């Protein structure tokens, strides 16, 4: 882009400021919002009671939130569309004889466009791009005839790529279903059906459950854990699926010696580079701990103060405050000890070999969905008692590592498929980027 003339965007656009009150029956106009994915879209947020100061948008108008344009939240009003947007939005349009609006939208969403948006945005805590700042952005000064030619090429490429993009979306949907199907087959015993036929004399899960009970009684006598209140018997309507021979239904409180939730330290207890990592729900991404995202620490003294919520490698975590409910992760061995906030529950099985299967079981989500349908709707939380009473499909102890290995092998295959899909997706995007670059280069 350095070889062509650049001009300030302000030379190509003009601000639009028409209040809703200028129209009769403006209350009947549709209120829109702006999404970084869908652009101008019908808002799901409640509109104000008085919308007289909302801004009118017509086809060809741009609208954006000054605080969110840095993530691509800008939209172009489609043809034959009109309505209102929040007065907090900036509304403008291109000068038709100088700049094609679709071309400007492509530029502002491109890597170069986002770079300049962040360059001219102002603010310390939250950066905002006002209209005057938007006008400072530099864009290629391309004759309108060449813009029209570039847009025709872009549309032709997108038209030809549409079948490929639809197929990629279809494959991504199928892959998600396959991933879920693997978990469903694993926790219901279907994935290891052949293994059970080959190993008919394996000790049943009922014996494992007896040993767990005996171990818990021993720990109570040694005062390592407190005696737990008896759990209610499992009712038929709590069982989400039929178990294979040798498995047994139980409650999580029966197989775990420790089920509790985290705590909430004071703001001054946190530090950017402390000694003990402190996990929050947002640190669980794709059912895995991602502590690099907004890490927080507490001191050793604070950790001792909140010793009840200390967690260790292998503990299974689940968020019990939503929406959404059911984020799950296994605590990694990156640190010797961690701590967690009150939106997370920790499950620590008496026998450590169960923890990974328990993780997969919770990831599948059937038992969580069952609790929600039985009465958590509207509360957006799962109580500790409900956590302890969750039903659990317990396999034979020797079958558990076989199930885990089957899941891992299947997921590895899914990962290969995902990489192939991502490669196709990146190729399609690269082709579109090349066409856009050609257009911006005049």
Image (cartoon, rainbow, N blue to C red):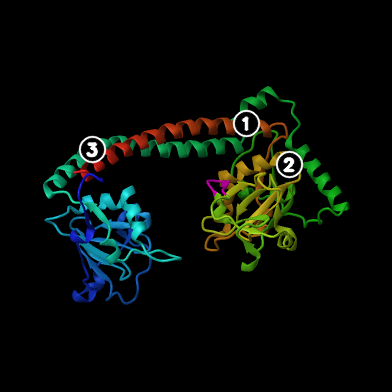
Q: Is mark 1 on a helix, strand or loop?
A: helix
Whichever of labels 2 and 3 marks the residue nearer the N terminus, that label is 3
N-terminal of the pair, mark 1 or mark 3, is 3
Q: Residues within 10 Å of mark 2 (few under 14, many from 20)?
A: few
Residue 30 visible in image: no
Dot 2 lies on which element? Answer: helix
Residue numbers of the magenta segment:
285-290
**70 and 5: which one is in front?**
5
Residue placed under numbered mark 1 in the picture: 405
Residue 352's tag is: 2
Kindly report which numbered mark, 2 or 3, lies closer to the viewer in this rendering: 3
Residue highlighted by disc 3: 157
Q: Residue at x 15, y 59 (%)?
A: 95
Looking at the rendered structure, the number of numbered marks drawn on it comes to: 3
Pinpoint residue 279: horizontal percent, then vertical percent. 62, 55
In the rendering, at what x and y percent does residue 61 appear?
A: 21, 61
């Amino acid at each position: 882009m350095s070889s062509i003339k650049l001009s300030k965007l302000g030379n190509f656009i003009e601000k639009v400021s028409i209040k809703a009150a200028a129209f009769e029956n403006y209350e009947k106009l549709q209120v829109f919002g702006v999404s970084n994915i869908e652009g101008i879209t019908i808002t799901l947020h409640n509109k104000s009671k008085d919308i007289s100061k909302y801004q009118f948008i017509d086809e060809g108008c741009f609208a954006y939130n000054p605080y969110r344009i840095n993530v691509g939240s800008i939209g172009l009003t489609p043809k034959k569309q009109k309505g209102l947007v929040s007065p907090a939005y900036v509304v403008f349009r291109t000068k038709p004889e100088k700049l094609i609006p679709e071309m400007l939208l492509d530029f502002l969403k491109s890597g170069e466009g986002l770079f300049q948006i962040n360059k001219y945005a102002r603010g310390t805590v939250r950066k905002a791009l006002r209209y005057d700042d938007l006008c400072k952005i530099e864009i290629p000064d391309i004759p309108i005839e060449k813009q029209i030619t570039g847009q025709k090429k872009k549309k032709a490429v997108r038209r030809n790529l549409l079948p490929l993009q639809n197929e990629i979306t279809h494959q991504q949907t199928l892959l998600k279903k396959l991933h879920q199907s693997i978990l469903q087959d694993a926790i219901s015993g279907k994935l290891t059906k052949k293994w059970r036929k080959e190993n008919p004399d394996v000790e049943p899960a009922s014996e494992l459950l007896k040993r767990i009970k005996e171990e818990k009684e021993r720990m109570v006598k040694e005062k390592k854990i407190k005696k737990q209140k008896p759990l209610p018997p499992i009712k038929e309507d709590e069982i989400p699926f039929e178990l294979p021979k040798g498995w047994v239904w139980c409650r999580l409180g029966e197989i775990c010696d420790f089920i509790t939730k985290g705590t909430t330290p004071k703001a001054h207890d946190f530090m950017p580079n402390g000694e003990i990592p402190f996990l929050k729900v947002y640190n669980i991404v794709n059912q895995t701990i991602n502590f690099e995202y907004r890490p927080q620490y507490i001191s050793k003294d604070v950790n001792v103060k909140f010793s009840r919520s200390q967690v260790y490698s292998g503990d299974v975590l689940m968020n019990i405050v939503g929406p959404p409910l059911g984020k799950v992760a296994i605590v990694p061995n990156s640190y010797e000890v961690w701590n967690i906030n009150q939106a997370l529950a920790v499950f620590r099985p008496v026998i450590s070999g169960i923890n990974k299967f328990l993780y997969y079981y919770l990831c599948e989500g059937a038992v969580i969905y069952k609790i929600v349908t039985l009465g958590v709707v509207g509360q957006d939380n799962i109580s500790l008692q409900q956590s302890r009473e969750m039903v659990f499909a317990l396999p034979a102890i020797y079958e558990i590592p076989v199930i885990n290995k089957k899941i891992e092998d299947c997921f590895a295959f899914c990962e290969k498929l995902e990489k192939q899909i991502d490669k196709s997706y990146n190729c399609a995007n690269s082709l579109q980027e090349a066409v856009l670059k050609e257009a911006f280069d005049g």
